C-alpha cells in the first residue's frame, strides 16, 4: 500500500518537470540532473546530437557521464522538484496516518502541475515547430540560435544561416555546418569544450577581404604584411608596396619589388633567409643613395658631400624638417621648420624632392648658398654652407 501511494505522488510531479531540448543546449550550460531524492548541478561538456545524448560534468566531484537530454532541467524546474519532494514527504506521512487524505493530495498535486506549466520560459523549445524557441518576451517565438525565419506566416519554417551571432557567447557565430559554431572573424578559441571563450588574434585572415588581416588592436583590420590600403575612401583594396616594413618581430626586413618577396633593410644582410633574420653590415652602400655608407654602430650612416638636412615638400616648396647635429648646415646656423626657397640662386618652387636633394649634394668642401624663409615670422635668411661628411642615425 505504501509503495503504491509513493509511486502515485511521484508521478504527480512529472508534469512539472521541464526537460531540456538537445537543440537548445550549448557546451558550458549549467543544468540540473534529475534524481529521485534530489537534483544535481552539472555542466554540459559535450553534445552528441546524432545519438541524442549529452556528456555532463558533476559539480561536486568533477566526474563525467553521458545522459539523455530529457534528464536535464533548469534551476527553476529543480526548485519546483524540491517543493514537490517536500510535498511527497508530507503527503506520504498524511497518507500513512489517514489513507482517505491521499485522494485530496493527489488532486492538489495535479492542480499545482497545471498552474506551473503555464509559466513562460525563454529558450524553451516549441512543441510543434523544430528549431523555434520562446523569446524573452512572453508569447513571442523566435528561431533558435543560428537559425532564421523562412516562412513565419504559415509554416513557421526556419533554416540554418552561417554568420549569425550566438545569443549567450560573445564573438561566436554559426558556422557553415548546421548546429556547429565557430569564433567570429579575427577570433580563435580559448576554451571551446566548457566556457566557449574566444580571444582576438592578430594576423587572422579576413573571411571576405583579400589580403586583409586582423590588426593588433581588437576589432581592427589591416592590410597583410607588405601591402598598403590602395584608397580607403573607395574600398578595401590593397596593393603590394616596395619598401614596406615587415613589422612585428622583423623591423629590418622590407618588401621587395616583386610581390611576396622580402629583402633586408638598408645596411642589413641575411642571417637566415628562411627565418627572415638579418644582421647589420658595416661599410655597406645604401641601395638608393650612393653617398651613404653604413657605420660600425648599428643604424648609423656616413653621408659624403652633403649639408645635413632632411626635407619634405609642403605646398610645392621644400621645408627643412630636421638639421642633423654637427652637420655642415648646423654649423652654418640653419634651423628646422623653415622653407628652403633657393639653392645657389635657383628657385626650389615646383621642383621634385629628388631634384632638391641633388642640388644640395656636391663634392666635400664645396660651398652652397641657401635662402630660407621662416613661415611664422616671414623673415628670410641667407646661409653659406660648406658641404662635408657627417654621421647620423637613420
Image (cartoon, helix red, strand yellow):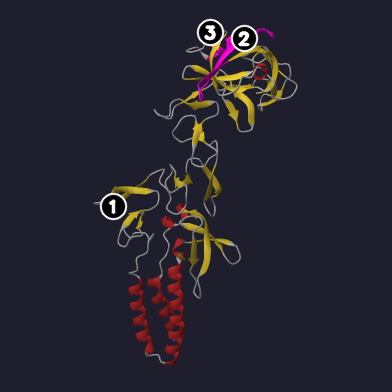
Number of numbered labels in the structure image? 3
At 36% across and 72% down in the image, what residue appears? 116
Image location (x, y in percent) of residue 15: 37, 71
Q: Are marks 1 and 2 in contact (CB under 8 Å)?
A: no
Element marked by disc 2:
strand
Magenta run includes residue 354: yes
Give how far apart the Cα atoms at labels 1 and 3 are: 81 Å
Q: Residues within 10 Å of mark 2 (few under 14, many from 20)?
A: some
At 44% across and 92% down in the image, what residue appears? 97
Which stretch did the figure color magenta?
353-381
Element marked by disc 1:
loop
Magenta run includes residue 122: no
Residue where numbered disc 1 is placed = 156
Compare residues 93 and 371 and report the one nearer the observer. Answer: 371
Image location (x, y in percent) of residue 303: 68, 15
Q: Quadrant of residue 309?
A: top right
Give how far apart the Cα atoms at labels 1 and 2 are: 85 Å
Q: Is residue 300 above or below residue 365?
A: below
Residue where numbered disc 3 is placed = 346
Q: Are marks 1 and 3 in contact (CB under 8 Å)?
A: no
Residue 129 visible at all? no
Q: Are marks 3 and 2 in contact (CB under 8 Å)?
A: no
Image location (x, y in percent) of residue 192: 53, 50
- For residue 368, the mark is 2
Query: Depth-wise, is mark 1 or mark 2 nearer the camera?
Result: 2
Compare residues 267 and 144 and report the one nearer the observer. Answer: 267
Give how far apart the Cα atoms at labels 3 and 2 are: 11 Å
Element marked by disc 3:
strand
Image location (x, y in percent) of residue 225: 55, 29
- For residue 360, the mark is none
Amino acid at each position: 500500500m505504501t509503495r503504491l501511494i509513493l509511486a502515485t505522488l511521484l508521478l504527480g510531479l512529472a508534469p512539472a518537470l521541464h526537460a531540456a531540448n538537445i537543440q537548445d543546449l550549448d557546451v558550458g550550460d549549467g543544468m540540473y540532473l534529475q534524481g529521485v531524492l534530489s537534483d544535481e548541478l552539472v555542466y554540459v561538456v559535450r553534445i552528441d546530437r546524432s545519438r541524442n545524448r549529452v556528456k555532463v560534468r558533476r559539480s561536486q566531484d568533477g566526474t563525467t557521464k553521458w545522459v539523455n537530454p530529457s534528464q536535464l532541467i533548469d534551476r527553476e524546474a529543480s526548485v519546483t522538484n524540491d517543493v514537490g519532494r517536500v510535498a511527497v514527504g508530507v503527503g506520504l506521512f498524511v497518507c500513512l496516518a489517514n489513507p482517505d487524505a491521499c485522494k485530496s493530495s493527489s488532486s492538489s498535486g495535479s492542480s499545482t502541475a497545471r498552474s506551473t506549466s503555464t509559466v513562460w520560459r525563454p529558450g524553451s523549445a516549441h512543441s510543434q515547430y523544430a528549431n523555434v524557441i520562446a523569446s524573452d518576451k512572453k508569447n513571442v517565438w523566435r528561431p533558435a540560435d543560428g537559425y532564421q525565419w523562412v516562412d513565419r506566416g504559415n509554416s513557421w519554417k526556419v533554416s540554418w544561416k552561417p554568420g549569425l551571432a550566438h545569443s549567450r557567447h560573445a564573438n561566436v557565430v554559426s558556422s557553415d555546418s548546421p548546429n556547429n559554431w565557430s569564433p567570429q572573424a579575427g577570433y580563435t578559441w580559448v576554451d571551446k569544450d566548457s566556457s566557449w571563450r574566444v580571444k582576438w588574434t592578430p594576423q587572422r585572415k579576413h573571411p571576405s577581404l583579400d589580403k586583409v588581416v586582423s590588426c593588433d588592436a581588437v576589432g581592427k583590420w589591416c592590410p597583410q604584411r607588405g601591402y598598403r590600403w590602395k584608397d580607403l575612401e573607395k574600398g578595401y583594396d590593397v596593393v603590394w608596396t616596395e619598401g614596406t616594413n615587415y613589422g612585428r618581430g622583423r623591423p629590418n626586413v622590407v618588401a621587395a619589388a616583386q610581390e611576396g618577396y622580402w629583402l633586408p633593410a638598408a645596411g642589413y644582410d641575411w642571417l637566415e633567409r628562411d627565418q627572415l633574420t638579418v644582421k647589420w653590415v658595416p661599410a655597406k652602400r645604401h641601395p638608393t643613395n650612393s653617398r651613404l655608407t653604413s657605420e660600425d654602430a648599428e643604424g648609423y650612416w656616413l653621408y659624403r658631400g652633403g649639408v645635413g638636412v632632411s626635407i619634405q615638400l609642403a605646398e610645392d616648396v621644400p621645408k627643412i624638417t630636421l638639421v642633423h647635429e654637427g652637420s655642415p648646415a648646423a654649423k652654418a646656423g640653419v634651423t628646422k621648420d623653415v622653407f628652403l626657397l633657393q639653392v645657389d640662386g635657383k628657385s626650389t618652387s615646383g621642383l621634385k624632392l629628388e631634384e632638391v636633394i641633388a642640388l644640395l649634394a656636391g663634392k666635400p668642401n664645396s660651398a652652397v648658398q641657401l635662402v630660407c624663409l621662416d613661415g611664422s615670422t616671414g623673415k628670410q635668411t641667407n646661409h653659406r654652407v660648406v658641404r662635408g661628411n657627417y654621421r647620423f642615425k637613420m
